[in-house]
Amino acid sequence: MFFPNIPYILTDLIHLSEIYNPNIPVWFDVIMLVWFSWTGILLGVISLYLMQHILERKLGRFTVWTFVLISALLGSIGICLGRFLRWNSWKVAKNPIQTGADLWGWAENPLSNLNRFYAVV
């Protein structure tokens, strides 16, 4: 549930155009976000690699690669839900039934939220 938060940090770069503070240069924010993103992605890949090796001994190679691919797919969906629909992991933890109902409604009619996607781009 919290795995998409790792690469999600990188998507915060789109907010740099909105921020203007004459006391803080933009290059400072760029360096900070890129550094935090790099660290988060590196730690995320390492944690997925460690989980892969732990599970490979018990489940076999094919099952574990399926786990890795499903984790990457669900992480990508999580990033999309967080960036465009403004959901976060805490919403799922605090109210899983309502979040599941919202997700089901969105999955039934995915075109209903296209305006959110185009508003960010």
Image (spheres, grey):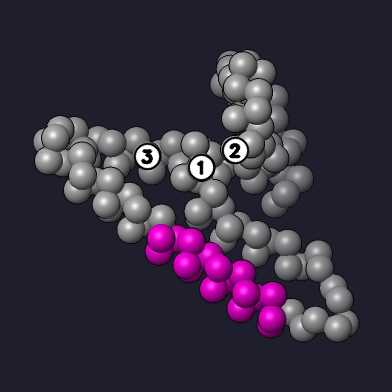
Marks 2 and 1, the one that precedes in the sequence: 1
Q: Which residue does the numbered mark 1 point to in the structure image?
A: 2
Q: Which residue does the numbered mark 2 point to in the structure image?
A: 89
Displayed quadrant of residue 101: top right
Displayed quadrant of residue 113: top right
Residue 33: x and y in percent read: 61, 69
Q: Amino acid at mark 2?
A: Ser
- How far apart, in angstroms, are the residues tagged by discs 3 and 2? 15 Å
Residue at disc 1, secondary structure: loop
- How far apart, in angstroms, are the residues tagged by discs 2 and 1? 6 Å
Task: Please tell me whether mark 3 or mark 2 is closer to you in this view.
Answer: 2
At a point 44% along the width and 36% down the height, the residue shown is: 74
Q: Amino acid at mark 1?
A: Phe
Above or below, 108 against 70 in this view is above
At a point 21% along the width and 44% down the height, the residue shown is: 54
Q: Which residues are magenta?
A: 27-43
